[in-house]
Amino acid sequence: MSHPAPQTVAELTEAVLAGAHGPDPAELTVTSAFWLYNTTRLAGGDVTYHNHYLLFRVGDAFGACSFEAGELGPEFCENASGQPLAKLLRHESAPVRTAALDAYLARVRPHRDAPDAERVMLPTGTPEVRAEARDAAVAGLLDIAPGAKVALIGVVNPLVAAIRERGGVCLPCDLNLRATAWGDPVTDDMTEVLAPADAVVATGMTLSNGTFDLILRHCVEHGTPLTVYAQSGSAVARAFVGSGVTALNAEPFTFSQFSADATPMYRYRAAIEDGAAA
């Protein structure tokens, strides 16, 4: 199904509600709703990651969105199962809207069936092994020259290392971390890293905290390559590949940290025409 490329998440949501991407979301209902909280500290590290997720299962697909502590309580799930996606797409909470939009887009076009997706298997192993493989896959989407400045919006230490191993200079930005594992200062103001960046890598959580549209617009206006790594809203981010997003590492549920077995990710790249992203 062809449809205009979206320029904002709100525009994409309105198109879905209007039926431009497939069946009426009022006819698709949530089978299961999950509120998840986990902490992770990788071996040898001194940083504990605190992660909160909202998940909706719709048929054979999951929609996911990470959110900040206190933004959404577990009681939300009490009445979420059985709700139509159209209602959740209009919810006042951005994480709820993002998870619903992700569930819809993953349902109508599963990553596993997408002909333009490159399937990458995370290996069976420890959290450290799987985290390193995941972040190497994300960094592998970067086409950067030695010394290129890479804005990393949403900091995970293995990805900082992976960017550096490819010759990039990492410019880290995160709302919660103040320093990388190597002591590099981390800013909480993304404008400080966007302005000098030759390339941008951003987490899917930017979809729910209101910064994705700003990052996308900056990259479009300045011709800056934008790579997204997404557990949150992986199918939502996919809708922007070729219209601002240069590459995407999509990791639908089950996420790497919730399994020790091999699990798939899906990498997408924007089409190239005459040396430029289409």
Image (spheres, grey):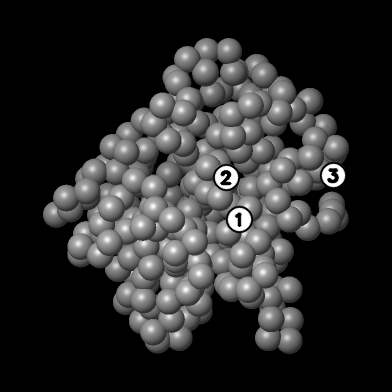
- Give x and y (percent) for residue 51: 37, 38
**41 vs 70, nearest the viewer:** 70
Tag 1: amino acid = Leu
- Give x and y (percent) for residue 275: 68, 86
Which label's residue is closer to the chain start, 3 or 2?
Answer: 3
On the rendered image, what quadrant is the C terminus found in?
bottom right
Res. 218 in view: yes
Residue 60 against residue 130 in the figure, above or below: above
Which residue lies under the disc numbered 2?
A: 210
Which residue lies under the disc numbered 1?
A: 214
Res. 126 in view: no
Tag 2: amino acid = Gly
Which residue lies under the disc numbered 3?
A: 20
- Give x and y (percent) for residue 128: 25, 54
**28 vs 264, nearest the viewer:** 28
Q: Secondary structure at mark 1?
A: helix
Residue at image location 58% in from the left, 72% down from the top? 225
Tag 3: amino acid = Ala
CB under 8 Å between discs 1 and 2: yes
